[in-house]
Amino acid sequence: MISEKDLKILFDKDSIQTAIKELGERLNSDYGNDELYLICVLKGAVMFMTDLSKHLKMPLRMEFIRLSSYGSGFSSTGKVNAVDISLPDLNDKNVLIIEDIIDTGHTAKFLMDFIRHNFKTNSLKFCSLLDKKVKREVKIDPDYYGFEIDDKFLVGYGLDYDGYYRNLPYIGYIMT
Ligand code: IMP
Ligand code: MG
């Protein structure tokens, strides 16, 4: 178990909340009063989704799915596990997927393809708090993101290492 003292803060609580407020304002202006389905990818996106949703003004519904691609280590496996992906009828709906981070892009691509294959949505977009662009292995870009980051393993604000640190109000990395 790594101690909190070994974490270097990258985004503090205020900068995360400011970025989320700005994203919320963009979404309000882009979707207007159109009804929206937010799909939260558990477990990492839970903090981001709940904070973001509080800024949104359109009629809103939320769904939660559970995918995993990471083992207990620091690097992505590239294989995506659909732990629980039961979804309501998304035909003709505006769908926005909410993720904590896009790393290799396998998870995001899997989910976008899954939804496209099963539904004819009115719109389908992707919103990630963090974008680790340098690590991308498949071609996918989020429609909305909060911060672009380098190749560092981050924890906090939903992001975990071996299940820990999700509760931190800031995002940091492990100093090695
Ligand atoms: P991808 O499929 O490689 O894009 O990985 C996406 C998933 O891996 C994210 O939803 C996270 O759950 C996890 N992940 C990627 N990078 C990090 C990190 O730096 N810290 C914690 N989890 C990460
Ligand atoms: Mg995730």
Image: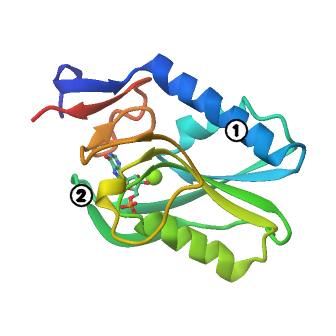
Q: Which residue bears the numbered disc 1?
A: 26
Where in the figure is residue 47, as x and y percent of width and height?
A: 54, 35
Give the crowd class for mark 2: few <14, some 14-19, many >=20 residues within 10 Å.
Answer: few
Some atom of ligand 1 lies within 8 Å of the CB belonging to the residue at label 2? no
State the residue at coordinates (66%, 82%): 117
Q: Nearer the viewer, residue 55 or 84?
A: 55
- Residue 127, position as x, y percentages in the image: 58, 50
In the image: residue 59, left or right of residue 63: right
- Few, some or many C-alpha atoms within 10 Å of disc 1 (few <14, some 14-19, many ≥20)? some
User: What is the three-letter code of the residue carrying label 1?
Assistant: Arg
- SS type, badge 1: helix
Disc nearest the viewer among 2 and 1: 1
Query: In the figure, is residue 34 to the left or right of 159?
Result: right
The three-letter amino acid code for the residue at tag 2 is: Ser
* Residue 14 appears left or right of 95: left
* 29 lies above or below 68: above
Q: Position of residue 142 (x, y in %)?
A: 54, 56
Residue 107: image location, x then y, percent: 45, 65
Q: Which residue is mark 2?
A: 75
Q: Quadrant of residue 106?
A: bottom left
Q: Of the residues under marks 2 and 1, which one precedes in the sequence?
A: 1
Q: Depth check: 84 or 96 in front?
A: 96
